[in-house]
Image (spheres, rainbow, N blue to C red):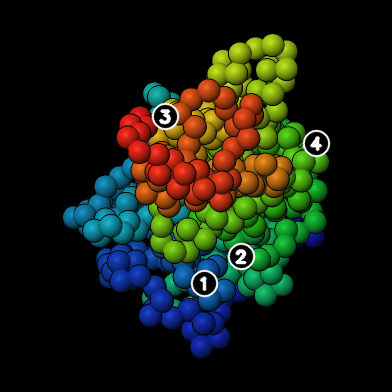
Amino acid sequence: MNLESGTDLTPALRIVPRDQHIISRKNISKAALRVLYRLNEAGYAAYLVGGAVRDLLLGVQPKDFDVATDATPDEVKKLFRNCRLIGRRFRLAHVVFGPEIIEVATFRGLGEEGGEGDRHIVDGRIVRDNIWGTIEEDAIRRDFRVNAMYYDISDFSLRDYVGGMRDLHDRVLRLIGDPVVRYQEDPVRMLRAARLAAKLDMRIDATAMAPFESLGPLLADAAPARLFDESLKMFLSGNGLKSFRMLEQCGLLKFLFPATARALKRGDVALRSLVEQGLANTDARIVEGKSVTPAFLFAVLLWGEVRDLASHLIARGEEGNQAWARAAAQVVGEQCQRVAIPRRFTFTMEEIWSLQPRFEQVQRKRVFRLMTHPRFRAAFDFLLLRADESPAMRELGHWWAHAQQLPQDVLAAALPAGGGSAASEPMPTPAARKTRARKRRRKPGEKPGPM
Ligand code: ATP
Ligand code: MG
C-alpha cells in the first residue's frame, strides 16, 4: 500500500509516554482491562486500539473497546473460557463478559488487499484478510489516522504510527494512504468519514473528500446488508441529524438514499423540515433512553418520493389505496437494492404511509378504527411531522392530538356518523366538536353512536 505522497512507506512511530496523554484505566471498561492484562501476562502484545483510543483522547466515552494482539485467534481462545471465534472474512475472537463483548483481533498483515468483491477464496473460506502481520502493518491498513493509535497495557504508553495525535489535535479526518486507493478497496470508508466527522465534530480533509463524487457510485457495489448496518450507525446512534447533514453536504446522500436526495432536490421546504425534525426527534429519544425503530426513520427518509409518486398515480386515474401501495412498493424496492432494510421494517413503513390518508377521514367509525390500529401511534407521530406541508395538515395534527384526549363518548358524539370525508365536508374543529357534543347529549332518547 502506498502512503500519501511525501510520507515514507515505513510508518514513523511516535511513542507518547503515560504522563503525556490523558488516557486513564479508570475510563477503560473492566472487561477490556482483564483481556489486556491476561494477554500481556501470557507473553503476548496487547493493545487497546481504534475508536476507543480515539474517543478516550477526545474525552468521549467509547461505544466499544477493541483489542489488538499478536496472539492468533486460536491462541486467544485458549486463554479465555468465555471466548468464541467469529467471522469468515476477518477471523476474530470475541471475549464475552455478560452483555459486554471485547473484540480481540490479531495484527493483520497487508497482503494484496482487494475490495469486497475481490476477496481471495480458498475452499470457500476467504483467506486473504486472515494474513497475520506486525503492529506496523496493522496500523496502516486501518482507515483514518485517528483510528490507528494503540494504547499499550504493558507501560500505558500510546503508540502513534501515522500522525493520529496531530490530526486529533487539528480535528481533521485524514485517510492513511492514498484516498482513492483506500476507497476503491472499501467504499464504505466514505460513509465512515461522514459519520465520524458528524459524531466527533471533525472536518474531513480536502484530499479525503475530493474523490466522493467520482467514487461514490462504488457504494452501489457494497453489500446492502452492510449498508443497512452502517445506516443504523449513522442515524440511530444519537447523531442522526448531524450525520444526515454531513452526508448531504459531502454529496454522498444520493448514492445511499437516491430517492431522498431526489425528493429534497425538488426544493420542498416542508419535506426538509419533516426529515430534519424526524431525525432530531430520534436523536432526542435516544438521549432520553427511549426506544427507536428503523422503520419510522426510513419511513421519514423515503416519504417525499412515496407521496409524490402516489399523487402522480392518483392524478393519472389510479384508485387511491392501490396508488399508495404501488408507490410504496416501488420506492422501497429501489431503496432495498442499496440498503437492505429487513422485511419486518418495510412492512411497518408501508403501514405508516398507508395510514396517512386515513387521518383525513373523520367519520365516527373510521376514527375509532384508526385509533385502535396497532400502528396508530407511529402513524400519528408521522402526521405531526407533516405539519409544514400545509395549514390544513397542521390543523389535522392538532385535531387528532385533541381527539385522543377526549373521553370516547364525547368524541363519538362529536363525530359525523358517516358520509363524507374531511375533503368533502368541513372537519369539526375541536371547538365545534364540543358544541356539537353538548347539543347532541341534550337530545333525549338518542341511541349511542357505533364505536
Ligand atoms: P465507532 O465505534 O465510534 O462507531 P470506530 O472507529 O471504533 O467507530 P468500528 O467499526 O468500531 O469503528 O471499528 C474499529 C476500528 O477498526 C476503527 O477505529 C478502525 O481502526 C478499524 N476499521 C473499521 N472499519 C474499517 C474499514 N472499513 N477499513 C479500515 N479500517 C477499519
Ligand atoms: Mg468502535
Whole-Å distance between the Cαs marked 1 and 2? 9 Å
Q: Which kind of residue does numbered mark 1 sit on?
A: Val
Q: Residue at x 71, y 42 (%)?
A: 390
Whole-Å distance between the Cαs marked 4 and 2? 31 Å
Residue at which label 2 appears: 200
Q: Residue 422 location, x and y as percent?
A: 60, 32
Q: Residue at x 30, y 71 (%)?
A: 30
Residue 14 falls in which quadrant of the image?
Answer: bottom right
Q: How many residues crowd around disc 3 within 10 Å: few (fewer than 14), some, or many (20 or more)?
A: some
Q: How many residues crowd around disc 2 within 10 Å: few (fewer than 14), some, or many (20 or more)?
A: some
Q: How many residues crowd around disc 4 within 10 Å: few (fewer than 14), some, or many (20 or more)?
A: few
Q: Earlier in the sequence, mark 3 or mark 1?
A: 1
**Quadrant position of the C terminus in the picture:** top left
Residue at which label 3 appears: 365
- Toward the front, the furthest residue is 444
Whole-Å distance between the Cαs marked 3 and 4? 38 Å
